[in-house]
Amino acid sequence: MSHPPLSMPTPVRLPLRELRFALAWLLPATVALGVAFGPLWALVAMSGFQLLVALIERVPGAQHGLAPTAQRSWHRLVLSLHVLWQLALLAWGLVHALDAGVGWAGALALGLAVGGVCGSQGITFAHELGHSRRRVDRALAWLLMASVNYSHFMVEHYRGHHVRAATFDDPASARRGESLWSFLPRSLLDSWKNAWALEAWQLTQRRRDWTSSALAAAALSQGVVWLALALWAGPKGLLFWAAASAYAVFQLEAINYIEHYGLTRRSEGSRVEPFGVQHAWNADHALTNALLANLQRHSDHHMHPWKPYAELAALPGPELPTGYAGCIILATVPPLWFRAMHSRLDALPASA
């Protein structure tokens, strides 16, 4: 009796355009190479990469992104592998910071260079992993945030910011006329306080104590790392670690400042207008979205928080003057930022 020939399974082909998200690996690779050549080269690699992206954002045609696509395992792999890149880069930078030939300024430069990667991409990818329904993804998000000593983001962002974004109750939403430098202390302090208050409320609701708190465990682990570094790496190692975390957090908060600047949801008493396309700034720049997991398609993200980044669409919401790389530069000089943004705010419909 003859049998039909065995058929081979059809291979799953990844569309070439999806490989663009692998461009995200260029930044940690570039900075790692710079670290190998020395602290100054590391800082030049980090700042040069960001400046180059900001310049490319201004090239005609760079503002047009690609259509959304179905989420694949490849898209999760891009995010998950960054955990390895970031931990390896932190270790690589720390080892070089402790080299006898590297002084205090060198350790600071290495920390800033590595922190630039951790902030622009590590926290961005942690944000995306934290929105996943997969427990392993959320665990990786906690790990990335703890590696920059900002684990309370894992509570405040999902339970706080996504509920209160574009309202005066949200510390991570910047108000019209508020400079980045005024926004930073308010957002840093209030986000931290809100995270612990939200965690305490949830524990009370679930009738649990702090021993079951992921936030408390993460905070304890951060303290243990600081103690270990103090004992093993000494002051220079602590300087590297502090600089890396501080610059990473600055990158996060600068992006927070940009994302909802001056946009406010209407409220009547305790009723707040539902989040709409008009309550977040967007930038559909192809390169920056490839590097940052489509974070700049921010209206769609807030309206559909569980939607994977590959599926986010460029909705017709308020448009930034350029991508995040360029906007961060503008935001550091308040008169330039206000000049670029206030005309855009004034041009929005009155309901925005």
Image (cartoon, rainbow, N blue to C red):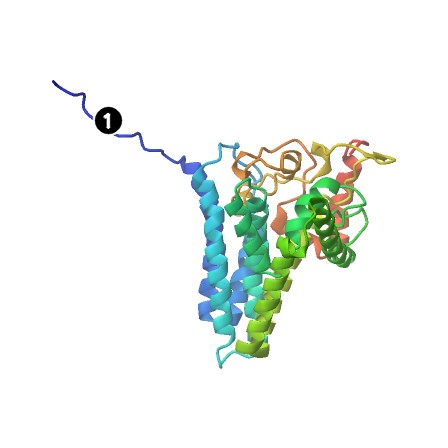
Q: Nearer the viewer, residue 294 or 239?
A: 239
| Furthest residue toward left | 1
User: Crowding at label 1, few (<14), some or many (≥20) Cα neighbours within 10 Å?
Assistant: few
The amino acid on which the numbered mark 1 sits, given as a three-letter code, is: Ser
Q: Give percent across and percent down for residue 281.
A: 69, 40
Query: In the rendered image, is residue 55 in sight?
Result: no
Q: With respect to residue 166, does 225 lie above or below? A: below
Label 1, on which residue?
A: 7
Q: With respect to residue 57, does 237 lie above or below? A: below
- The answer to whether residue 235 is left or right of residue 343 is left
Question: In the rendered view of the protein, which quadrant contains the C terminus?
Answer: top right
Q: Give percent across and percent down for residue 90.
A: 51, 64
| Furthest residue toward bottom | 100
Q: Quadrant of residue 19?
A: top left
- The answer to whether residue 87 is left or right of residue 209 is left
- The answer to whether residue 226 is left or right of residue 25 is right
Question: In the rendered view of the protein, which quadrant contains the N terminus?
Answer: top left
